[in-house]
Amino acid sequence: MSTYRNKYLAHLDLAAAFGPGYSVLPGINRSDVDAALAAMADLFNAVEQGLRNRTVMFKDISIIGGAEALLRHLEDAQSWRGLPRSERLRLTKLVHETNRE
């Protein structure tokens, strides 16, 4: 048990695991990520505007609960894609019928 605990704790401390001066994304900071996300949102909205004459709000990701919630949503999406198409269609129809009631 202590071996597992020590490995778990060691992986929680990136500085200890990778050494001093380690950066998860060297040379990339939050403003770089924000700029890349804004550029992607602009591109997606240009396509959406052209195809459907509407846009999508991509700001304030915190409204879904922050990074942990975002990861859960992405995991759910991955699970959803793993379902057979017929099952996805059945569930989608069920959700739409439930929302109408």
Image (cartoon, helix red, strand yellow):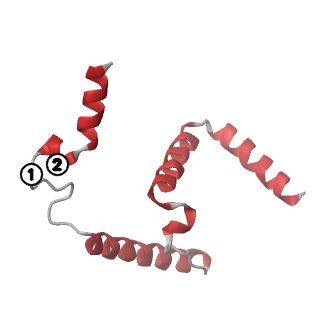
Give the residue at x 15% y 60%: 26
Q: Picture quarter containing residue 30?
A: bottom left
Q: Residue furthest right?
A: 101
Give the residue at x 31% y 27%: 5
The C terminus lies in quadrant: bottom right
Given contact means CB atoms under 8 Å apart, are the residues at marks 1 and 2 in contact?
A: yes
Give the residue at x 28% y 75%: 31
How much space separates mark 1 and mark 2, taking CA atoms? 6 Å
Which residue is identified by label 2? 15
53 over 94 or under it: above or below = below
Q: Residue furthest top?
A: 1
Q: Residue furthest front?
A: 2
Where does the image place residue 45, in percent across and percent down from the top left? 49, 77
Which three-letter amino acid code belongs to the residue tagged 2? Ala
Where does the image place residue 50, in percent across and percent down from the top left? 53, 79
Which residue is identified by label 1? 20
Where does the image place residue 33, in percent across and percent down from the top left? 30, 69
Q: Does residue 71 appear to the left or right of 3 in the view shown?
A: right
Q: Picture quarter containing residue 63?
A: bottom right
Q: Does residue 16 appear to the left or right of 61 in the view shown?
A: left
Where does the image place residue 53, in percent across and percent down from the top left? 61, 81
82 over 38 or under it: above or below = above
Give SS at disc 1.
Answer: loop
Give SS at disc 2.
Answer: helix
Which three-letter amino acid code belongs to the residue tagged 1? Pro
The N terminus lies in quadrant: top left
1 or 2: tag closer to the N-terminus = 2
Q: Does residue 96 appear to the left or right of 10 in the view shown?
A: right
Q: Does residue 32 appear to the left or right of 52 in the view shown?
A: left
